[in-house]
């Protein structure tokens, strides 16, 4: 399952006291169904902001986001929430697992939010946790898991409803190199196996290098990475 | 298995609320605040129930005492009504449906003198048998015990008899404030009467009340002050009968012009009003405790919301709607409030009932008119207390929940 992602002329401005900071100055982006795209850029360049706009977590000041033919700006809060639930899987730098729920319950959450019968959500969560090698840990609370394990659970949660679009924001940014590599490999493998369209934001060139296409967000504008820097 | 809750069929808001209630027990800071919030609500409900029960208990005792000494209906005849007219009116009223007994009385104030002592007294001149407002009467004397008939004389309270060492047959002077004009100037009217018996005045009565024969009373206070005491067979019936008496009086010459009919309610209006006022102010005072308790609950919920900020952000990101999150936090507040209300309610009712049954709070009987603090839990009060508490707590929960649901997911997830 995959969708096409389109962003046209995205503008986002923040107020910092009296100062206006234009983070995105007309970003255009097109991601084909099933494609894996990395967005790189220095810290504070607006990568996360762009990802929030693509995921419908925030609204742009100008331009529009169209996912699978759906214009997000035309959706109201409630319908946008339902759209996010069904269509988009999120993985963040921090796992953001609910500390009072076990690994299994955390992976079941999207299904329960979608109104799935508990049994179905449970089976799907068990299947995903098995896929990432965490069957033994399903009844553990996040505080009882290692950093890499937590991020793998977060990845399972993102894929719980088999969303056609995966948005990942520095998914390995908070992990040691070995754990980071394991999570990244899993993410890439799952993305490929499920044919999910994916946008991955990172400042790590190595991570970006594993993606089919790399875009650079610089000074509020998105540009293809030059072949010269790609090779480095 | 530790992950049972989310595999249950319960709706998501309920699952979240239950888990947060449970998780708050594991976190020391929120545990403390939750305990404070639940404790404050419980304490408020407890205080309100117990204090209202004590007040109701006292008021019920007082009411019973007062009502025992109040006629069902009293008809005040206009001044200068002749004894014959009064008698005719009494007969006419007695003939009405619902009327059990009609008695003619004269009321006045005077002094009792005996053995060099003096006491101010409310004097009731009566016709026939002693009025019901003089309960527990006994005329125990050797004469009476020997089968002698009840002697006309003065009926005094047991308290006065004990204080003055009076026995049946002892003589007491009754003095009227209304003087007799004599060639030597005004002289007080005095009648000397033997003590006919004693009655039980009740501990609520502050002033001495004495009963004496109607003709003696009229000679002390002058003619034309008669009233009719009507026995209607009960407080409830009295209201209907009073209406019937008034209705009949309006239709024909049942009563002399200017006669006034008053029920026990009207006769005790100031007292009943004071009792009601007392309850209202106590209720308002203790309701402030409930308000403070509701604010404690709100503070607690706000802390939980702050604590769960990241959770709320993630749930919104995963597509949970603000409405469902609001429901979850309202439910959490409702669970805390219900726990507090139930605990306080149960403890309050149990305390009040036990304290009343076991006479836990003793009072010096010679100072107060009861020997222990009486408690009466009225179902209406209970419903009102629980209702107000839950309403305040739910309002606090709703506000806290509203704040949680209004979080911006992007902001909430920022570290």
Image: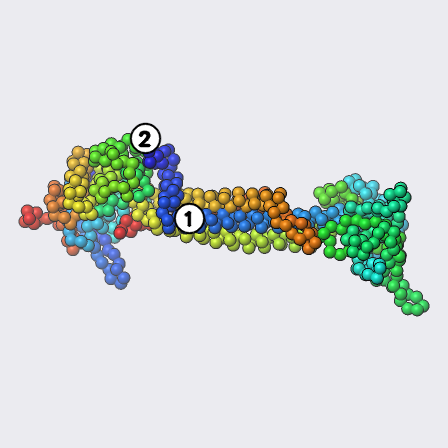
B156 or A70, nearer to the observer: B156
Q: SS for tag 2?
A: helix
Give the residue displayed 18% in from the left and 47% down from the top. A173
Provide residue B368's location: percent of width, then percent of height: 68, 53
x then y, percent, for residue A128: 24, 34
Label ID, residue B221: none
Picture coordinates of residue B215, whole percent (x, y)? 89, 53
Write down the chain letter for disc 2.
Answer: A
User: Dot 1, how many residues are within 10 Å of its Cα: few (below 14), some (14-19), or many (20+)?
Assistant: many
Q: Nearer the viewer, mark 1 or mark 2?
A: 1
What's the distance in space between the residues labelled 1 and 2, CA to CA?
33 Å
Marks 1 and 2: same chain? no
Provide the residue designation for mark 1.
B34
- Number of numbered discs present? 2
Instruction: Tell me if B406 is positioned left or right of A225 in this view.
Output: right
Q: Which residue is mark 2?
A: A119
Residue found at x 33% / y 42%: A100
């Amino acid at each position: 399952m995959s969708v096409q992602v389109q962003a046209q002329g995205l503008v986002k401005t923040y107020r910092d006291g009296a100062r206006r900071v234009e983070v995105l100055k007309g970003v255009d982006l097109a991601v084909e169904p099933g494609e894996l795209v990395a967005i790189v850029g220095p810290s504070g360049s607006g990568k996360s902001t762009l990802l929030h706009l693509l995921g419908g977590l925030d609204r742009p000041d100008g331009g529009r986001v169209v996912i699978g033919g759906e214009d997000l700006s035309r959706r109201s809060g409630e319908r946008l929430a339902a759209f996010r639930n069904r269509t988009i899987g999120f993985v963040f730098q921090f796992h953001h697992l609910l500390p009072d729920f076990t690994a299994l319950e955390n992976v079941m959450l999207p299904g329960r939010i979608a109104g799935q019968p508990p049994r179905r959500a449970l089976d799907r969560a068990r299947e995903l946790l098995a896929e990432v090698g965490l069957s033994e840990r399903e009844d553990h609370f996040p505080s009882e898991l290692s950093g890499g394990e937590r991020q793998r659970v977060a990845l399972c949660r993102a894929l719980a409803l088999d969303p056609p679009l995966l948005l990942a924001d520095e998914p390995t940014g908070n992990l040691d190199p070995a754990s980071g590599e394991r999570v990244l490999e899993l993410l890439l493998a799952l993305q490929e196996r499920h044919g999910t369209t994916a946008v991955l934001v990172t400042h790590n060139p190595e991570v970006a290098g594993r993606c089919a296409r790399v875009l650079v967000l610089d000074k509020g504008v998105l540009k293809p990475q030059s072949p010269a820097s790609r090779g480095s | 298995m530790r992950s049972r809750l989310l595999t249950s069929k319960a709706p998501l808001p309920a699952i979240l609320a239950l888990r947060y209630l449970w998780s708050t027990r594991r976190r020391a800071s929120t545990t403390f605040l939750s305990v404070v919030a639940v404790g404050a609500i419980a304490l408020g409900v407890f205080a309100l129930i117990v204090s209202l029960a004590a007040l109701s208990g006292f008021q019920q005792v007082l009411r019973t005492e007062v009502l025992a000494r109040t006629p069902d209906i009293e008809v005040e005849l206009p001044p200068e009504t002749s004894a014959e007219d009064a008698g005719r009116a009494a007969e006419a009223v007695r003939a009405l449906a619902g009327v059990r007994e009609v008695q003619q009385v004269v009321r006045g104030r005077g002094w009792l003198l005996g053995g060099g002592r003096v006491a101010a007294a409310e004097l009731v001149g009566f016709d026939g048998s002693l009025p019901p407002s003089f309960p527990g009467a006994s005329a125990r004397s050797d004469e009476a015990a020997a089968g002698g008939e009840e002697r006309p004389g003065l009926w005094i309270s047991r308290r006065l008899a004990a204080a003055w060492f009076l026995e049946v047959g002892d003589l007491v002077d009754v003095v009227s404030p209304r003087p007799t004009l004599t060639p030597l100037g005004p002289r007080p009217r005095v009648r000397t009467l033997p003590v006919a018996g004693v009655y039980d005045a009740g501990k609520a009565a502050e002033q001495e009340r004495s009963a004496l024969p109607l003709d003696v009373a009229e000679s002390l206070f002058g003619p034309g002050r008669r009233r009719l005491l009507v026995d209607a067979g009960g407080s409830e019936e009295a209201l209907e009968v009073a209406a019937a008496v008034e209705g009949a009086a309006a239709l024909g010459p049942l009563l002399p012009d200017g006669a006034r009919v008053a029920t026990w309610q009207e006769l005790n209006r100031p007292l009943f009003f004071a009792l009601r006022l007392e309850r209202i102010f106590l209720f308002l005072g203790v309701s402030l405790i409930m308000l403070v308790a509701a604010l404690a609950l709100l503070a607690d919920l706000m802390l939980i919301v702050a604590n769960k900020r990241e959770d709320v952000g993630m749930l919104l990101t995963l597509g949970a709607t603000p409405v469902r999150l609001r429901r979850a936090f309202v439910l959490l507040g409702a669970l805390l409030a219900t726990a507090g209300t139930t605990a306080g309610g149960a403890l309050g009712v149990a305390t009040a009932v036990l304290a009343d049954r076991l006479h836990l709070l003793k009072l010096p009987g010679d100072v107060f008119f009861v020997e222990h603090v009486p408690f009466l839990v009225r179902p209406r009060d209970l419903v009102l207390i629980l209702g107000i508490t839950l309403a305040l707590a739910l309002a606090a929960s709703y506000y806290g929940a509203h704040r949680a649901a209004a979080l911006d997911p992007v902001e909430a997830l920022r570290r």
